[in-house]
């Protein structure tokens, strides 16, 4: 039996895969990957060269996001595809 979290993540991945890659799609994926607190603490901007830049609301949130960067990048890539977001920059 599959857990509800795994099933929901799989549905979200399939839903996003059927949509064109846009800055809005990547920003949505960022918010889902980051969760409610981190998602609200940063403003994502996706560039055409595959760089996702997240401007944080404070130095404290910046430090938290920097610590979590490998996990956050992995989660975003899982949602939008591994070749879409090549780099995550926290400012």
Image (tube, grey):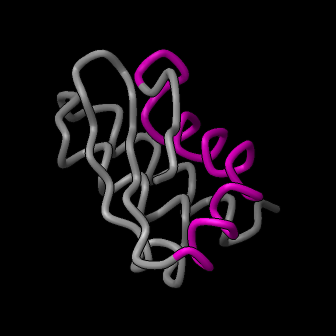
Q: Nearer the viewer, residue 59 or 49?
A: 59
Q: Quadrant of the N terminus?
A: bottom right
Direction from residue 20 to residue 52 in the image, left or right: right
Q: Residue at x 54, y 58 (%)?
A: 33
Direction from residue 14 to residue 34 in the image, left or right: right
Residue 64 in the image: above or below residue 15: below
Q: Residue at x 37, y 59 (%)?
A: 55
Residue 8 in the image: above or below residue 85: below
Instruction: Examine the structure image and report whether residue 4 is included in the region drawn in magenta.
Output: no
Q: Residue at x 40, y 53 (%)?
A: 54
Residue 16 in the image: above or below residue 40: above
Q: Within the image, what quadrant is residue 18 found in? A: top left
Which residue of the protein is positioned furthest toward the bottom in this rendering? 37
| Whole-percent x, y for residue 90 in the image | 51, 50
| Whole-percent x, y for residue 19 in the image | 21, 35
| Whole-percent x, y for residue 12 in the image | 43, 53
Q: Residue at x 73, y 42 (%)?
A: 70
Q: Nearer the viewer, residue 61 or 20?
A: 61
Which residue of the protein is positioned furthest toward the front in this rendering? 59
| Whole-percent x, y for residue 43 in the image | 31, 63
- Disc count in the image? 0
Instruction: Examine the structure image and report whether residue 69 is included in the region drawn in magenta.
Output: yes
In magenta, the rendered stretch is: 59-84
Give the prevailing secondary structure in the magenta stretch: helix
């Amino acid at each position: 039996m599959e857990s509800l979290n795994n099933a929901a993540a799989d549905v979200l991945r399939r839903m996003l895969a059927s949509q064109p890659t846009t800055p809005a799609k990547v920003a949505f994926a960022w918010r889902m990957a980051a969760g409610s607190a981190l998602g609200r603490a940063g403003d994502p901007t996706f560039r055409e060269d595959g760089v996702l830049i997240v401007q944080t609301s404070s130095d404290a949130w910046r430090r938290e996001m920097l610590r979590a960067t490998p996990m956050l990048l992995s989660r975003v890539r899982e949602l939008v595809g591994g070749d879409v977001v090549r780099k995550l920059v926290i400012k």
